Amino acid sequence: MKIKIIVFTLLLAAQLQAQTKVWFDTDLMIGMPDKTPREVDDGITLIMALKQPQIDIVGISSITYVDYSYDIINKILKWHHKGTTIPVYKGSPNAADLGVENDGTRALYKALKKEKLTILALGPMTNIATLIQNHPDIIPQIEKISICAARTPGLPFNPGNGKLNVFDYNYEFDTKSMDVILNSPIPLVFAGYEPSSYTHIGNIDLASLDQNEEADKWLFDIVQPWMEKNEKYFGVRGFIPFDCSTLGVITHPEYFTYYRDIPIKVNYKKNDALEVQPKVPFKNFLEVSYKYKTKKKVDYAIRALQGFEEKILETLSVKN
């Protein structure tokens, strides 16, 4: 019996040692009352992250809609996190105030002073860029940033039936902050639309959720309006869980293919999403290509491999 206890203790210690310390920065909007349903993937990604033994979330900061997201994040934590309290902080309320400190940036700075962290960036880069711009001394403490943005040249963002192009929201909402990130020496991995387009979640996929559990029923019900919106605009009832790939390259890197050390560049080009941005004929595109001669090089996830979608669904069904 003593030998079994010792082996178990050693395995537990090894697992804890292997954990990646993560700061979670999100523009979570799931269920937000508005004229139209809002994205649900940040909320699903947070639930998934809380169920991953590979990572240890040390703090969460919000970007845009910070008052709404603060309450929802804490609700999700109450349901899905039973360990040490994870603090939640309000960040930039509008993603247009680069350089202005907030509770989120101050808390992230303090956390990085204690230990090195990987940053999971699921929204515009305002909070993180403000930290880097105001406190360049902290840069060596950032192991890497995983970002939901960017594309390969000529790739339209056209989910579902491909008839309607959308835009690179997280990049275009605050391009100045992304410039700060790109001009830093911090290792970056991008996992946005392109790898995520190989995954899709519909009602059948969510059938494994327990409708008798408050948390599961809430999730199932709250994604329905978003599915209906996707069916209206893209012809498919369901959605692409974009931010799950941004998490996945940290927790399940083996489920993705990559362009390693690929140059990244901002290109000013004709807008390919005029239906949703009719007043923007030209705009900046954040693109990666080995043809570019830029100094900044990143890792870029190209594709989510078979099995990752199943991994998302399995994780959502795990009971804490």
Image (tube, grey):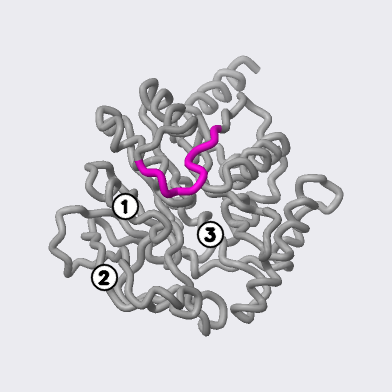
Q: Earlier in the sequence, mark 1 or mark 3?
A: 1
Q: Is residue 19 above or below residue 224?
A: above
Give the residues drawn in magenta, as a range: 89-98
Q: Name the spot of residue 235 as percent of width and height, x first.
A: 63, 81
Count of residue discs: 3
Neighbours of disc 1 within 10 Å: few (<14), some (14-19), many (20+)? some
Which of the two residues, 115 or 226, is positioned nearer the viewer here? 226
Expressed as whole percent of the image width and height from the top left, the position of residue 14 reads 47, 28
User: Is 117 drawn above or below residue 64 in the view shown?
Assistant: above
> Three-letter amino acid code at disc 1?
Lys
Amino acid type, callout 3? Phe
Q: Main secondary structure of the magenta part?
A: loop
Q: Earlier in the sequence, mark 2 or mark 3?
A: 2
To which residue does mark 2 refer? Answer: 268
Q: Position of residue 220 (x, y in %)?
A: 75, 57
Task: Residue lying at the far right in this picture: please name it.
Answer: 212
- Amino acid type shown at disc 2: Tyr
Disc 3 designates what residue? 308
Tell me the crowding category of disc 3: few under 14, some 14 to 19, or many 20 or more residues within 10 angstroms, Cα based: many
Q: CA distance from mark 1 to mark 3?
A: 33 Å
Q: Is residue 9 left or right of residue 209?
A: left
Q: Is residue 22 above or below residue 293?
A: above
Residue farthest to the front?
279
Q: Quadrant of the C terminus?
A: top right
Mark sitting earlier along the chain (2/1)? 1
